[in-house]
Amino acid sequence: MKDERLHVMHTFANNDGVPYMTWFMQRASEQRNVRFTIVLLHSEKPAMLDEIRSFGFDGIWIKFNNERRGPSMLKALPQLWWHMMRSRPNIVHGHLFDDTLPAMIAAWFARIKGRIYTRQDTGFHLNYAPKWVFLDRLNARLATLAVAVSEDARTIMLEKEHAPRGKVAMVHHGIPTQRYTVQDSDAERRLRERFQLTGAFPVIGTLARFIEWKGYRHIVDAARLIVESHPTAKFLFCGSGPQLEEIRSMVKDQDLVEHVVFTGWVDRSDVPSLYRIMDIYLHAADHEPFGFVYAEAMMSATPVVSTPTGAAKDAIDGPHAGLLVVERSGRALAEGVEQMLKLDHVKVGAAGQKLALRMFSFDRMWEGYMAIYRHGARGN
């Protein structure tokens, strides 16, 4: 018997696990109104394949070498086309540039009616590799619809990538609300002990990869200024990446070793509690297409001080719900933290949580994409 459900083929490059795709599969298996085929472009067999199949969906692995992106995309293109011709999905949905470009080209040649991509890396080519912006524009031409995840992302898509205004939809990312609103006192106590936070105030945390555009240099500069006024301040640096050792050296040079904790790996189940042991969440990125960390921190009722980018810029419109600093510098970040500490930051966290529950719930994200899929399946 033919499966009449809407069929969406998702493509992801360089990821062997995608949390929000897990949430999508869970919801789809419950509602049974859509089925997924998930294609993973990855250097090794992705761990997520077994999870995909456990939900009853098709998982496909295409070998992909991130260090040779151009040739890998060329090799992936005919394989993607073959899988599309074989399974004939109603929608092809790309998520990251390395999978979106070959997926949109393959879907165009396969005459798939709905060619959709979520623009999750707006600003990257513009800021770091401007010669490749023309390929972002090609994606916009080939797609039938492009999804922005924040107002910043939409502006870049329209003004810099020249996407037709009628082709750009807006859907914020979302997260399961219960995960970030239910308190786990045991986990919080365990994390406080692990990071030796007894007597520390304020506890200021950042969850981000150690890469230049996440702004850890500015956070270290801010930490030096904050510690001068708050000698019991502790900073939690949560992440990994190529800039880690450089930031460690900066922390040592600034005589901040006693004030900065490099947390290392924190189990995903403990992340909501990690936000809750922070008095302030501090972020210094020069761009974030969305930034899950903002939504997670706000939903955990942790006040946010951040550069004005991504989801934070969309949600925070005044100090009642968080603070956006005027420039990307250590001094501006330190001033933002000082201003937050003068406010009732518990009240600010509660207001931020209320906003996040309204704007960034997974239910809202799911309904947004279901509407897009229904629209796209008609070839509009």
Image: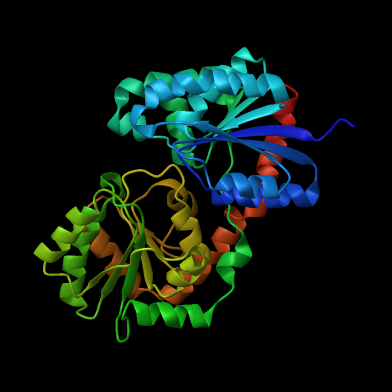
Q: Residue at x 75, y 49 (%)?
A: 29
- Give the quadrant of residue 79: top right
* Residue at the top extreme, as displayed: 109
Q: Residue at x 62, y 48 (%)?
A: 50
Q: How many numbered dots are placed on residues in this image?
A: 0
- Give the colour scheme of this rendering: rainbow
Q: Quadrant of the C terminus?
A: top right
Inspect this view and state whether residue 74 appears.
yes
Q: Is residue 23 left or right of residue 163?
A: right
Compared to residue 286, the image places residue 77 above or below, namely above
> Which residue is at the front of the view, 347 or 149?
149
- Give the quadrant of residue 58: top right
> Which residue is at the front of the view, 261 or 231?
261
Q: Is residue 309 left or right of residue 55?
A: left
* Residue at the right extreme, as displayed: 1
Q: Quadrant of the N terminus?
A: top right
Q: Residue at x 19, y 79 (%)?
A: 231
Inspect this view and state whether residue 162 appears.
no
> Which residue is at the front of the view, 177 or 160?
177
Residue 133 position in % (x across, y down): 37, 23
* Residue at the bottom extreme, as displayed: 199
- Give the quadrant of residue 66: top left
Residue 177 position in % (x across, y down): 61, 62
